[in-house]
Amino acid sequence: MCKAKAISQKLVALIEEVDTEYENMIKAQSTVDLVLQDILHYIEANNFSASDGYKLAKQIKDKRQERREIKIEMDTIKLLKEKVSKYKGVMADANMSVVKLEQKERYKQTNAVYHNRVLDKVI
């Protein structure tokens, strides 16, 4: 495989990976939010001991900390996504150009006919 083609495909894949990772972070945050809502609904609907209340508070704290970590990660990925999104189309075009050029050069190479410049006959 042509090195330029391999590199351009990797660059396109990396840009797409940023988008995918951002979507994964959104899903992770949503999941944590749902867990928090479940805990709050449980608290609202049930009576519990002080010990269980402490456990519920600890669960809320742990999930809030997990959510904070997700938000920090999501914010950094969002910044990266905004910075590289303008290159997404450019890299896709560059990749296609490299692929077409490679195909054209391979076609020329396989169908090339060489005409001797000086020698009348090589063998």
Image: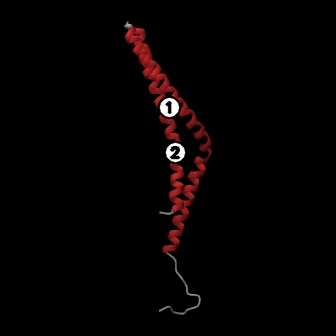
Height in image: 14 above or below 115?
above
- At a point 42% along the width and 22% down the height, the residue shown is 35
Residue 122, position as x, y percentages in the image: 50, 91
Residue 5, position as x, y percentages in the image: 52, 59
* Residue 111 visible at all: yes
Q: Which disc, if any, is residue 83?
A: none
Height in image: 104 above or below 119?
above
Q: Tell me which amino acid carries mark 2.
A: Glu
Residue 90, position as x, y percentages in the image: 60, 51
* Residue 99 visible at all: no
- At a point 47% along the width and 27% down the height, the residue shown is 66
Closer to the camera, 54 or 7?
A: 54
- At a point 49% along the width and 24% down the height, the residue shown is 65
Height in image: 104 above or below 37?
below
Badge 2: residue crowd in 10 Å (few <14, some 14–19, many ≥20): some
Q: How many labels, in total? A: 2
Secondary structure of the residue carrying numbered label 1: helix
Q: Tell me which amino acid carries mark 1.
A: Ile
Closer to the camera, 58 or 68?
A: 58
Badge 1: residue crowd in 10 Å (few <14, some 14–19, many ≥20): some
Secondary structure of the residue carrying numbered label 2: helix
Residue 37, position as x, y percentages in the image: 45, 18
Q: Which disc, if any, is residue 26?
A: 1
Q: Quadrant of residue 59?
A: top left
Q: Which disc, if any, is residue 16?
A: 2
